[in-house]
Image (cartoon, rainbow, N blue to C red):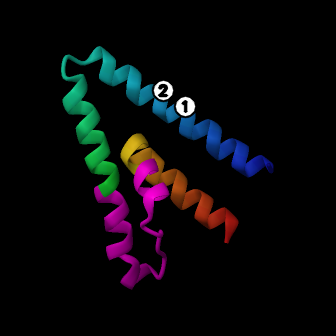
Amino acid sequence: MNIECKIIASLLILFSIIILVVMLKSKHFLSGLILSALSGIACLFAVNILSAITNFTLAINPLTLGISGIFGVPGVIALLISRINLY
């Protein structure tokens, strides 16, 4: 695994921990978790809708839906960064 992948993985873990800590301190943990998942999936679809302008797409498959659903917007950002670095 190269250094870029390690950096992306560590940032994804860091953002996930921050999101979970903030949601756990909130009184609305479940609704915050659902909102984070929905915003991540909406962001994934927004990237693909804007692909007509940007010529940049992310595949919609179970892996990308899972990452965007679990990690939310930081997951989509990590997918975008990994797509830029790998291609």
Q: Is residue 77 above or below residue 36?
A: below
Residue under numbered circle 1: 14
Quadrant of the drawing holding the C terminus: bottom right
Magenta region: which residues? Answer: 42-67
Based on the displayed image, in which of its 4 quarters is residue 61 positioned? bottom left
74 with respect to 50 (left or right): right
Extreme right residue here? 2
SS of the residue under disc 2: helix
* Rendering coords of residue 86 (x, y %): 68, 65
Q: CA distance from mark 2 to mark 1?
A: 5 Å
Q: Secondary structure at mark 1?
A: helix
Disc marking residue 35: none
Taking the spot 43% from the left edge, 41% from the top edge, the residue there is 71
Label 1, residues with CA under 10 Å away: few <14, some 14-19, many ≥20: few
Residue 47 coordinates in the image, percent (x, y): 38, 68
- In this rendering, the answer to whether 85 lies above or below 68 is below
**Residue 69 located left or right of residue 39:** right
Q: Residue at x 31, y 44 (%)?
A: 37
Q: Which residue is mark 2?
A: 17
